[in-house]
């Protein structure tokens, strides 16, 4: 199956507050915000940001081959 469009993405960041400030300045609308979570919209496209430390998710440091 091939993807035909993307409606949103999930990203992991170190600082949700700084991320919110940055995307708000770009014109995104903040939908939900908590200390460790942020959800923003721009027209129909959404981005979810989750706070994490790299030591919380060691698997994120592993390299993976995409096929």
Image (spheres, grey):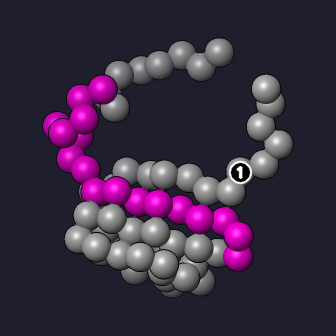
Answer whether residue 26 is visible to the viewer in this image: no
List x then y, in percent, for residue 32: 41, 76
What residue would you read off at disc 1?
Answer: 6
- Is residue 36 found left or right of 5 in the rendered image? left
Q: Residue at x 17, y 37 (%)?
A: 55
Question: Is 52 part of what is drawn in magenta?
Answer: yes
**47 shown above or below 3:** below
Q: Which residues are magenta?
A: 43-59
Residue drawn at x 48%, y 52% is 10
Question: Which quarter of the figure has residue 27?
Answer: bottom right
Give how far across and how far down residue 46 sits, in percent. Answer: 59, 65
- In the image, what residue occupies the spot 35% across and 22% down? 62
The one nearer the camera, 16 or 32, is: 32
> Does dot 1 land on a helix, a strand or a loop?
loop
* x, y percent for residue 17: 30, 74
Left or right for 4, reference 23: right
Q: Quadrant of residue 13?
A: bottom left
Total numbered badges shown on the rendered structure: 1
- Expressed as whole percent of the image width and height from the top left, the position of residue 8 reads 61, 56
From this view, report whether residue 62 is shown above or below residue 34. above
Q: Quadrant of the C terminus?
A: top right
Q: Mark 1: few, some, or many residues within 10 Å (few <14, many ≥20)?
A: few
């Amino acid at each position: 199956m091939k993807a035909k469009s993307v409606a949103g993405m999930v990203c992991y960041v170190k600082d949700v507050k700084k991320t919110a400030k940055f995307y708000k300045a770009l014109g995104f609308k903040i939908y939900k915000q908590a200390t460790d979570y942020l959800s923003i919209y721009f027209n129909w496209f959404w981005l979810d940001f989750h706070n994490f430390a790299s030591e919380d998710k060691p698997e994120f440091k592993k390299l993976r081959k995409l096929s």
